Image (cartoon, rainbow, N blue to C red):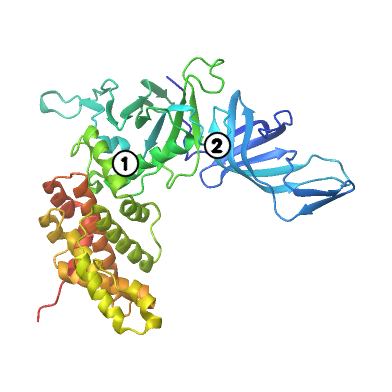
Amino acid sequence: MSSDPLLLSESHEWSGLWWLPGAPDERVPGVLRYDRDGGATLSLIGTFENRIMTEDSPWLTAVHEGSRTWEVMHGVAESREITLLDCVPTSTKRTMGARVDSPDRQAVRAQTVLVGVHTADEDDSLFEALQVSVENLGHWGAEKVFSGFIGAPEGARFDGSGSISAKPLESTSVTVDGTEFTLDHRRTAPSFDARRGETTGRIRDAAFVRIAPPGGCSLSSAIRSAKSIQDLISLATHRAAGVIWLRLKLTGEGPGAERHPAERYVEVLYSPAAVGERDAKAIDHHRVFFTCDDIPFEEIILRWFEVRDRLHAATDLILALRYAPAQYLESRLLMAAGAAEALHRALGIEERPMPTAEFKKMRAAMLALAPEDQRERLKSAIRNDVNLRERLNALAERPDQQAVSELVPDLDRWSRRTVKARNDLAHEGRTPDHSMEELVAVVEATTGIVILNLLHEIGLPADRQQKIVREHPRLRSIAEWAKAELVTPES
């Protein structure tokens, strides 16, 4: 069993020697520190030349405004190779000419840290697989790992006896376009923590996903793959799903493989859309849209990557509200309406209002009546496209209709008021005809319709869609908003 992965939520520190790839003999001592808020900072006792200088003549050197940055830095610390990527010096203190001779100091900020390998490029395909752990992954996987026995003979009260058992480690795999996805587990052996006042027995089980592309992967492709799993769990749980850890498995031909014949893992410290907390309380089951009990792992992975590739613009806009919720209602309105438009276009259900040939004749006749100097501008304005209201109504027809009607009872008023709000904001910069409460209802109802469409596209059954609308706290509140603010008053 390999060592435990480095958690993105914890602080880490390494003291070592550091150098630029083109000058491996010019090594500078320093300390690399990582924490989730500040990222990775290298504090050097010494400096790398970051000034931009030109030699105008043998006796004159000009120093220009700005500073050098380095794509890659290498280091060794605690018997491990370390690579720093996208490095920017944040402060440099030189002591030349000072009264007391002391070493120079320099601080360097790195975007990404690889612990366990030296590489020159984030696109080098050095790795045969990646492992990623995401918040609530175990709950979403719906695997019953632990079971317990409580001693209560003949219906009596608990007598103090009992046991906790863990089933043998198992994994579930599926292949998508040659890439193998595996839902797997890391588990600690049973241990006992004896204290002066009590003793605690412990087994820790952590779910993770292993992804093995057919031709290996680079750091950049591994981060994209990790994000795809993060997005899936975020959609399933309707909340930001933080990455807890990410590690890469080196191929047998990787750097230093001849010196390390056993399996080697590289730890990745970076800044995902959200950082996960391993020890935070798990999500309540009522707040989850679906788990592998609803759609088995082998099926949902296949469906998710097909849907994500086809509808990536809409999924990115909706999930952006989970990872970094917009602070202003107006921006949320634009994102929700934009997600609906992007989704409708990607679904390929768009029908032109008029046959193309007939539209061209009509446009030509209209342009012939316009002043000649205005025709080019009018030509781009006269379009044969579906409008936003038609797109919203078409989206509302796709998911289970019982779920849709419970979420948004008056679809006609919802679509009209959504279009009015979006157009007013886009054209006038404000929404004077909407109260704050109605605007919230418009944003939430539009977001809810897009979510139901995404759940419908991945194949969530109709009865599950209905149950989500009735029981999920967020969708229940959306239905209440829509019923209060988006229902046409009786005459």
* SS class, disc 2: strand
Residue in the image at 50% along x and 14% along y: 261
Q: Which mark is residue 282?
A: 1
Q: Nearer the viewer, mark 2 or mark 1?
A: 2
Q: Residues within 10 Å of mark 1 (few under 14, many from 20)?
A: few
Q: Residue at x 33, y 66 (%)?
A: 333
Q: Which sits in the foreground, 281 or 224?
A: 224
Q: Amino acid at mark 2?
A: Val
Which comes sooner in the sequence, label 2 or label 1? 2
Question: Is the C terminus in the top left, top right, bottom left or bottom right quadrant?
Answer: bottom left
Q: Position of residue 420 (x, y in %)?
A: 27, 74
Q: Would residue 267 be found to the left or right of residue 144 on screen? A: right
Q: Quadrant of the N terminus?
A: top left
Depth order, front residue of 254/6 = 254
Give the residue at mark 2.
Answer: 113
Q: Are marks 2 and 1 in contact (CB under 8 Å)?
A: no
Q: Can residue 202 be seen here?
A: no
Q: In the visual, does 228 lie left or right of 464? A: right
The relative height of residue 315 versus residue 159 in the rendered view (above or below) is below
**Label at residue 272:** none
- Depth check, front residue: 196 or 385: 385
Whole-percent x and y of residue 465?
Answer: 16, 50
Three-letter amino acid code at disc 1? Ala
Residue 330 is situated, as x and y percent measured from the top left of the image, at 37, 69
Q: Residues within 10 Å of mark 2 (few under 14, many from 20)?
A: many
Compared to 414, does 79 lie above or below?
above
State the SS at label 1. Answer: loop
Residue 20 visible, this angle:
yes
Is 241 placed left or right of 259 in the picture?
left
Residue at image coords 19%, 66%? 355
Above/below status of 293 relative to 152: below
